[in-house]
Amino acid sequence: MTNTVFVLASASPTRKKILENAGITPIVRVSNFDEDAIQVTDPTSLVLTLAQCKATAVLPEVTQEFAGQKALVIGCDSIMYLNGLVYGKPDTKDIAIATWQKMRGNYCELYTGHCLIDLQTQRSVMRYGVTKVYFADATDSEIASYADSGEPLCCAGCFTLEKLGGLLIEKIEGCHTNVLGLSLPILRQMLTELGYSLQFSSHGTNIK
């Protein structure tokens, strides 16, 4: 049986790597959706809405490209919720520094929304995950040098878990891949709800 086509509606190399590490080779189709068009303050509603918009934005292209094949499309979006406020990617280094001054010695909730669409049945499911992230009491010098590295400018919440920013994380509570931008446990739940199963082999993971 032919493996199901799995489309990732995201330019994130981290999300792509999460799937590849789990044995799933995604086809990347960037949504180019304007996230600023969604003005929602509730973190749950925001990440679910953005995930859905990203997945549906690539549907016309993907539907034409993979007509007649079993295909799934996933869209994801992540935000940091800190002290009652939503934080996405910082626009500038100064914003990253100011945000980290609020983050140090504190904790946040990292929300990631997921939307999975089955092209054949036009069914979709949406889920979100929340992971608590506790930050080290970083010094001004550490914060400034981390901002200078450029890494926090590319990340929701001004940090990464798997790269340089991992040295400034004390601990997490919950799913670690949710912090990275795509929760594997949530993905498995959504696949099951849509009637799919996973088949593992030394060559990778098939979605049946």
Image (cartoon, rainbow, N blue to C red):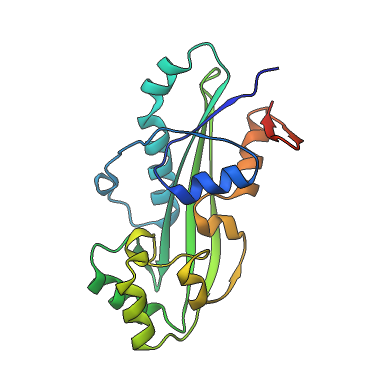
Depicted 111 relative to depicted 194: above or below: below
Depicted 154 relative to depicted 52: above or below: below
- Give the image quarter of residue 199: top right
Q: Position of residue 133 (x, y in %)?
A: 53, 70
The residue drawn where x is 75% and y is 36% is 200
Q: Quadrant of the N terminus?
A: top right
Q: Quadrant of the C terminus?
A: top right
Q: Position of residue 14 (x, y in %)?
A: 48, 51
Q: Is residue 24 found left or right of 110 in the rendered image?
A: right
The residue drawn where x is 39% and y is 30% is 56
The residue drawn where x is 53% and y is 11% is 68
Q: Position of residue 102 (x, y in %)?
A: 36, 79
Q: Position of residue 96 (x, y in %)?
A: 30, 71
The residue drawn where x is 39% and y is 56% is 42
* View extreme (top): residue: 68
- Give the image quarter of residue 63: top left
Depicted 193 relative to depicted 37: above or below: above
Q: Nearer the viewer, residue 178 or 11?
A: 11
Q: Is residue 48 found left or right of 195 in the rendered image?
A: left
Q: Nearer the viewer, residue 35 or 18?
A: 18
- Count of numbered circles on the image: 0
Q: Is residue 117 found left or right of 188 in the rendered image?
A: left
Q: Nearer the viewer, residue 137 or 107?
A: 137
